Amino acid sequence: MPTTHICDLAIVGGGLAGGLIALALAKKRPGLDVRIVEGSPSIGGNHLWSFFASDIDEGNRWIVAPLISYGWTQYDIAFPAHKRTLKSPYYSIESERLDTVVRATLPPSALMTGRKVLAASPTAVVLADGDRIEAKGVIDARGPGDLSLLDLGWQKFVGMEFALDEPHGVDHPIVMDATVEQIDGYRFVYTLPFSATRLFVEDTYYSDTPDLYRPKPGSGSNSDPIAERVLDYAAAHGWQTEHIVREESGVLPVTMGGDFEAYWQSGGNKVAKAGMRAGLFHPTTGYSLPDAVRMAALIATASDLSGAGLHALTHDFARRTWKARGFYRMLDKMLFRAADPDERYRVLERFYRLDPQLVRRFYAGRSTLFDKARVLIGKPPVTIPRAMRAIGLLPSAKS
């Protein structure tokens, strides 16, 4: 017989955004009856999230501190005409760690994993098995809404964690190695050393399409060109692979424009939202962790956790964030529409010659007016007419 579950707050989606909100509430509001509803058996899925220390406000670091799996004090970037080491703390969180911490922090009754959601309203969640959750407030954190409502490019990637036969000799991350062949847009390889013989290598593309061109399970095809490039990169560096510990792939939106309100309503007009579903991700990187931390801190200290109160809180925060990031969307237009795909790396190469503090603020989504001027001043790596057409200051060449 169907069961009705009663609670104070229901979080629909147990990914990064939902997990962080639950942990923040458990710390700040321990008496609150919270439920996380997640379709998969675990919290967090199969992901690795990385961030710079400067991405997180000092007052919010308590939210992510228990989740950190790895940390380094500096990182490298490499381009055909420019290489650099930047002194900046950098951290990674494994989804397994998020799952472990959430389970250790919340009571078992709070975790409703393996449960498919049919519908969510501001105060109720309907499950596929007939059960229902009645809550004072509901937050939908199930991933992206209707991305077709936004003007997008794509960051797509395939990553592999290797156990190696011998030490790899890498002591800090290589966040961008763009000395590799440029394929399908701006391509770079991302490397994280987890231990002396454990290494994560990811092949990343800033592409016009979200297609990863990977063989589908059961297709009978063994051809996986992106995975082969990851293996080739490891072999070229002399990293002899004992076995592949874990593999992940994904596609993130790079935003050039769109209708924020239409995007918000596509996920349910009056339902509170968090994470990608709220449009809370960096327009250029697609990364959602810094915004997810800010949202978790905001909700944990909110006085009104009703459905209406949460909707107003999350919508207003997401709308303000969207409006504040027009500069990044403009830069994305220049990257995707003013530069030829195999020349996009030049835009990033120039960017990484700038002041490290400017770079940190850029990734945090908090560029100052001076930062914005500095990014735009100087000889651009694309032609000025193409740049002006990309951002709409000149008519398209086809018009």
Image (cartoon, rainbow, N blue to C red):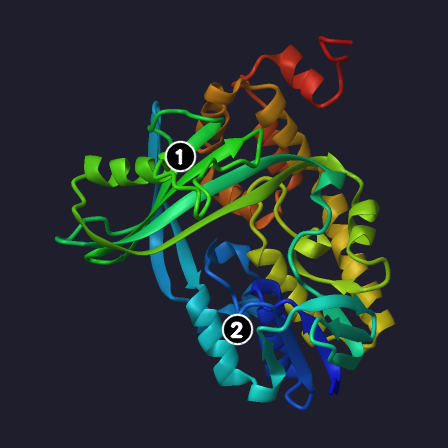
Q: Eyeballing the image, is 278 above or below 190?
A: below
Residue designated by label 2: 62
Q: Can residue 263 be seen in this view?
A: yes
Residue designated by label 1: 188
Name the image quarter holding residue 378: top right
> Which amino acid type corresponds to the residue marked 1 in the rendered image?
Phe
Q: Residues within 10 Å of mark 1 (few under 14, many from 20)?
A: many
Mark number displayed over residue 346: none
Q: Residues within 10 Å of mark 2 (few under 14, many from 20)?
A: some
Q: Which of 183 and 212 is in front in this view?
A: 212
Q: Which of 287 and 230 is in front in this view?
A: 230
Measured as percent of width and height from the top left, residue 61 is found at: 52, 68
Q: Eyeballing the image, is 62 above or below 190?
A: below
Measured as percent of width and height from the top left, residue 86 is found at: 37, 44
Measured as percent of width and height from the top left, residue 155 is found at: 53, 39
Q: Can residue 176 be seen in this view?
A: no
Q: In this view, does 278 lie to the left or right of 247?
A: right
Q: Look at 68% across and 21% down and name the residue there.
A: 390
